[in-house]
Every structure is written in C-alpha cells, then in structure tokens.
Amino acid sequence: MDGRFKLDNQLCFRLYTASRLITQAYHPLLADYGLTYPQYLVLLVLWEKDSQPVNDIAKRLQLETNTVTPLLKRMEAEGILTRTQGKKDARQMIVKLTKKGRELQDKLSEVPETVGSSVLCDSVTPETVPALFHMLDDIIGQLKHNNNESNS
Amino acid sequence: MDGRFKLDNQLCFRLYTASRLITQAYHPLLADYGLTYPQYLVLLVLWEKDSQPVNDIAKRLQLETNTVTPLLKRMEAEGILTRTQGKKDARQMIVKLTKKGRELQDKLSEVPETVGSSVLCDSVTPETVPALFHMLDDIIGQLKHNNNESNS
DNA sequence: AATATTTATATCGTTCACGATGCAAATATA
DNA sequence: TATATTTGCATCGTGAACGATATAAATATT
C-alpha cells in the first residue's frame, strides 16, 4: 500500500494522540476541583495576568471567542471568575478572577510538576525538551501562518 | 510569578495547539469530500486493512468505542462504509468500505503530501522528523502506560 | 447445565472546537 | 453629522471526545 497513507507515518496523528492522552493525564488532577483542561488553560492565562478582555484570552490560547465565551460562562457559574462589561469599550467583557479562582493556584500547585514528570522518558529529558519545544513552536508558527493565509 | 504555571513553559499546551492547528490545516482539503479529520483517520485505518471490527479501529486510533461508534454511523450514513454484525461473534460490528469509501483514497491522494509539506520549516525537516517522531512516540507510550495504570 | 464474569458495542449527558451568522459599540469615511 | 466599515462578543448547529452506564453475546466458573 502507498506509504503516504500509513497512519504510522503521520505527524498529525501523533500530535492528535499525544494531545488527547495528555489531557486525559490532567483529568484526575483537575476533576477534584471541577475543572476541565481548557478551563485550566484559562486559569493559567489569568494567573499570569488578571483582568483581561475575552479577546486577549482567546488570542493567548489560539482559540475563537465562540469557544471561549461558553467556557468562561461555565467558569463564571462555578464562581471562579467574573465577566463585567468594559468601561472604556462597552463591547469588551473584562474577565477577572474571584478569590476562589485565585486560591485555585495554590491548590493546583503540584499539577504542572506531576504532569511534567509523567511525560519524561528515554528520549524526552530536561536536555531534549528545549529542542522539542523549538520544533513544536516552529510547527505552530508555520501552521498559524498557513491557516491565516488561506483565509484571506 | 511561579514559572511552573507559565503557559509558555508547558509541553501540553504546545501539543494541544499544534494538534488543533493541524486539524484546521486538513479542513479545507477534506471538506470538499464532506470529511472531518477523525473520519479521515478512520479511512486511513480501513485503507490499510479493510473489514475490521469496531474495537480494532478504536484501538488503532487510541479512541473509545463511544467515540468511534457515532463517527462510524455518520460515515455509514454518507455511504462511505457499511457496518454489519459479525458472523463468528455476533457482538462484533464489522466495518467495511464501500466503493465510494475506497475511491476516496484516489481523490485524497494529494492530502498527505500537502499537509506534510506545510509543516516543514527551519527546525522540522526530513532529517529532524525521525527524532520528533521518536519523542512523540515515547511520550504517547509513557502516557498510555500511566493513564492505564491509574485506572486499575 | 446454571450462574457469574468478561467482552463488544451502544446510549446518554456534558464539554469542547469551530464554521456560519447576528448584533451592537466603536471607528473610519463621506 | 450621516453612513459605512470594523471590531468584540455572542448565538446556533454539528461533530468530536469521553466518563458513566446499559445490554446482549461469549466465555469462564461452579
């Protein structure tokens, strides 16, 4: 059979699988606090810089607002954050962490290390991770560029 | 702020983003034939080996049957494949490509190369891809192992 | 042979992800 | 200032993912 179509030859399938499995690895750590992995990503963004409009959060996560808006609403319903209309620009919705949202950072302090260490193996070590990051960043940059190009 | 929580330090976020962007890259190529990326993956599996039970397809894609079953039903509705009860084991549903499903392989012959070449860049070249594959395979193997372990 | 367990698949509910579209506020242009 | 365009966010519909659970067939145990 044509080797081009072999699943094992495909980068995309590996990324797809790795991404799903790593989300599953987060699950037991986050489920205790009623969080999903994308919600955890939102928290990472807000812990870095609190009080941001929806658009900035979406851009940071490379997601569309139609993905982020419902996600934020669920987190608001959970009392993790607030969404208030911007004063300077009435179109913007400013997202702020609540006390509960900020406190989650302490409660989840073990998470990055736990997941991080669970991925380490023969070929993925503190020495090789930078090279892996570099390749993934290049791929992401390339795809972002190509995908945007075909939209215009 | 604690560097552990920085989005930019996280392997998982890179994999998550790369996976999503690559799916988006496939979209325009597959949409012409009414296919989604996961449906394309099912086709890759069946082109490799036609006539498989649901479970074998799910295992190959590292997915659960509750993800694959509805997916296969949609593809059946599109006339791409058939699902017939197994004779040897009446619990199994045997999935077979239709003529239309087999013919899609010719129509999509350009897809692997098109997507493949669109990710090539400075740090991702035919020379470095094997190393990237090796790291991703290691990560996948590690995660598969860890995730199964915590289920038992 | 009768009962228990495992296996293969399916159903259900929830949460993304995202294309398409809508709407109101802000900005640019006439 | 009136009109057009852009921008920020939201709504809607569809298709994954996946945890939890159900069901029937196959297999193992008693």
Image (cartoon, coloured by chain):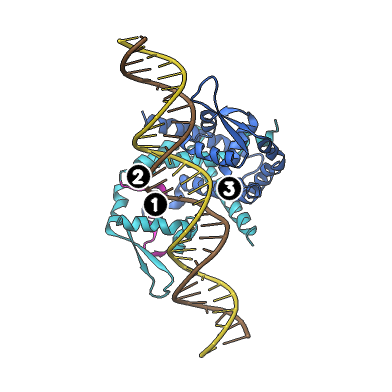
Chain colours: A cyan, B blue, C brown, D yellow
Residue A3 placed where, x, y %?
68, 33
Mark 2 secondary-structure assignment: helix
Q: Which chain carries label 1?
A: A
Residue that badge 1 annotates: A39
Q: Which of D14 and A41 is in front in this view?
A: D14
Q: Is residue A67 above or below residue B84?
A: below
- Determine whether, in the image, residue A144 is placed left or right of residue B139: right
For the residues labelled 3 and 1, the Cα–Cα distance comes to: 22 Å
Q: In the rendered structure, which amino acid carries the disc numbered 2?
A: Leu
Dots 3 and 1 on the same chain:
no
Residue that badge 2 annotates: A30
Q: In which quarter of the image is residue B87?
A: top right
Q: Mark 2 lies on which chain?
A: A
Extent of the magenta region: A33-53
Q: Nearer the viewer, residue B42 or B84?
A: B84
Residue that badge 3 annotates: B22
Residue A28 placed where, x, y %?
35, 40
Label drawn at residue A56: none
